[in-house]
Image: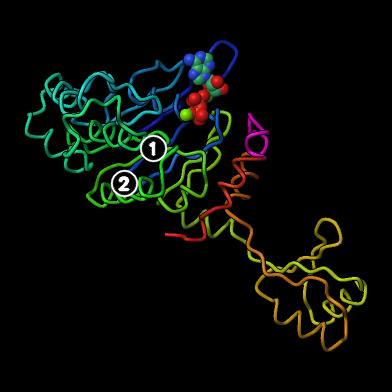
Amino acid sequence: MIELAGLTKRYGEKVAVDDLTFAVRPGIVTGFLGPNGAGKSTTMRMILGLDHPTAGDVRIDGRRYDQLKDPLTYIGALLDAKAVHGGRSALSHLLCLAQSNGIPKSRVREVLDTVGLTAVARKKTKGFSLGMGQRLGIAGALLGDPRILMFDEPVNGLDPEGIHWIRTLMKSLAAQGRTVFVSSHLMSEMAVTADHLVVIGQGRLLADTSMAEFIRRNSRSYVRIRTPERERLLDVLHGAGITVLEAGGDALEVDGEKGELIGELAARHQVVLHELSPQRASLEEAFMRLTAESVEYHAHSDTAGLQDWGAGWEKGS
Ligand code: ADP
Ligand code: MG
């Protein structure tokens, strides 16, 4: 269990983390979602005692990080910035880490095996791909067999196979009863990974909810309609007791999955339709609405981010 109480971090005038209070529970994957600059990495660094809170407090199983004896056996983390000495092999990096943390050497072989790096264990890490580097970072996080794991944007820049591997690993760690806390700026990533969702924007808590509840509340299905005979169609639909919303431009919207019904009504009354399309408000839209006022870099969310967000949540988990 990780517990944050009023956790706050200021850098001069800038409030990076603003009075965050929430708990990360064992046995599930908790997604930590927020646009770039929302304060996710800063929060995670404070959890690990790498940054000092301006105010508030964070506890790991009831204790502050600096009160933990052999902290790697309580909490393992993969942070955004990779800090592996390129001249070393994966094996010697992990052996070193094990030694300085009172972890038996035999554990190094186990974690190399878990992350699939056994075959390249003696190779210098400077030749590692991004995916191999992530695997090595994860091996380090797993080394102390901790009950709590934290990953900061672990799938950034990975290929589909690497992404799939990390998702599966996180779920299996949670299924073993561990606490798994993972950050992302992509709603689509959270939707297929997380059981619980904590959303922040500009350092502030915006949502703390189960993924199922978030999906239930935020994925409205509706039908989009365009017609050159707007008034006639409105009469027909109102006559059938259907509530119509005026959408942007010349479009109309009807809540629910009423596409066939509307098509049949239009045909019966000989109203011309130019469009009749079932739609689903995406979780990405819900996330963007939630964080709208707090997006620091609009340019990013309007372009690259949007396509990512649109990509994959329907695959669902
Ligand atoms: P995220 O990980 O969600 O993208 P960060 O925690 O990295 O967000 O950053 C949150 C905010 O704090 C950003 O506005 C960032 O520029 C600022 N920030 C982070 N670290 C520092 C620092 N060392 N000095 C000054 N500002 C910082
Ligand atoms: Mg970050």
Nearer to me, 132 or 44: 132
Q: Amino acid at mark 1?
A: Pro
- Left or right: 88 with respect to 167? left
SS of the residue at dot 1?
Answer: loop
* N-term-proximal mark, 2 vs 1: 1
The residues colored magenta run 292-302
Q: Please say which color scheme the image uses.
A: rainbow
Residue 229, quarter of picture: bottom right
Q: How many marks?
A: 2
Nearer to me, 77 or 308: 308
- Left or right: 181 with respect to 222? left
122 lies above or below 160: above
Camera-near label (2 vs 1) is 1
Q: Amino acid at mark 2?
A: Met
- Mark 2 surroundings within 10 Å by alpha-carbon count, few (fewer than 14), some (14 through 19), many (20 or more): many
Residue under label 2: 170
In the image, what residue occupies the spot 24% across and 48% down?
177
171 falls in the magenta region: no
Image position, residue 119 (x, y; %): 17, 39
Residue 16 can be seen in this image? no
Residue 15, quarter of picture: top right
Label 2, ligand 2: CB separation under 8 Å: no
Q: CA distance from mark 2 to mark 1?
A: 10 Å
Image position, residue 296 (x, y; %): 63, 29
Image position, residue 222 (x, y; %): 68, 67
Q: Are marks 2 and 1 in contact (CB under 8 Å)?
A: yes
- Left or right: 298 with respect to 74? right
Residue under label 1: 154
